[in-house]
Image: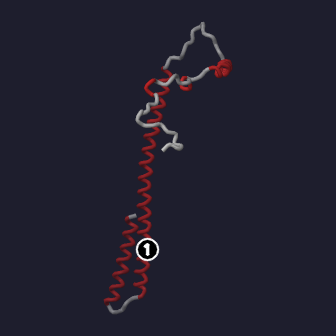
Amino acid sequence: MNSVIQTQLDRIDTALNALVSSIESYNPSLPAAVDLLAADGELQEGVRQLIQHQANHARILNLRSAIEAQNQQITSTLTLLANTRQDLLSTPATVFPEESRNVSYTQLLEYAQKISPYTVPPASRKPGPPPANSAIQTNEATPLTNGVGDA
């Protein structure tokens, strides 16, 4: 990219020198002015390409850092997965005693359904009598009124 911009700057320098030389000799050259304008247009296009190139380079750097972060995340996830697998494989399996009964899950669910109307979880039990200190206390000096007619 540097060589492209350098070539365009050299072309502007050459065209500008040609135009200045023609003006110094009191014979302004119209083709030299047109060449300078064309060189300026090429330089503007080169600068636009340079800006796009720099934006693309910055995007590439951002993508590389995102890829590196995701690679680290994948590596840590795979390490965790391998450790979990090793823990699972090293965990001893449950061995049921020979005198235990095999109950299928359908029988277990049927039994739970039959007893569910007769069981209540502890949170929904009816509260007992209120504690003695929570009774309503009134002040004897304040007369009780129902708000109708008493003034």
Query: Coloured how?
Result: secondary structure
The image quarter in which residue 17 lies: bottom left
Q: Secondary structure at mark 1?
A: helix
**Residue for point 42% across, 65% down:** 51
Q: Is residue 123 above or below residue 46?
A: above
Q: Nearer the viewer, residue 116 or 99?
A: 116
Left or right, 120 with respect to 79, comes to right
Quarter holding the N terminus is: bottom left
Which residue is at 43% across, 83% downward? 34
Q: Is residue 88 above or below residue 138?
A: above
Query: In the depicted view, which residue is nearer to us: 56 or 16?
Result: 56
Q: Is residue 106 left or right of residue 6?
A: right
Q: How many marks?
A: 1
Q: Nearer the viewer, residue 49 or 26?
A: 49
Residue type, mark 1 in image: Glu
Which residue reaches farthest bottom?
26
Residue 55, x across and y down, in percent? 43, 60
Q: Residue at x 52, y 39 (%)?
A: 146
Point 43% across, 40% down: residue? 72
Read off the residue under disc 1.
42
Pointer 1 local density, CA inside 10 Å: few below 14, some 14–19, many at least 20: some
Q: Position of residue 76 (x, y in %)?
A: 44, 36
- Residue 119 lies, in percent from the top left, at 61, 20
* Residue 62 locus on image (x, y percent): 42, 52
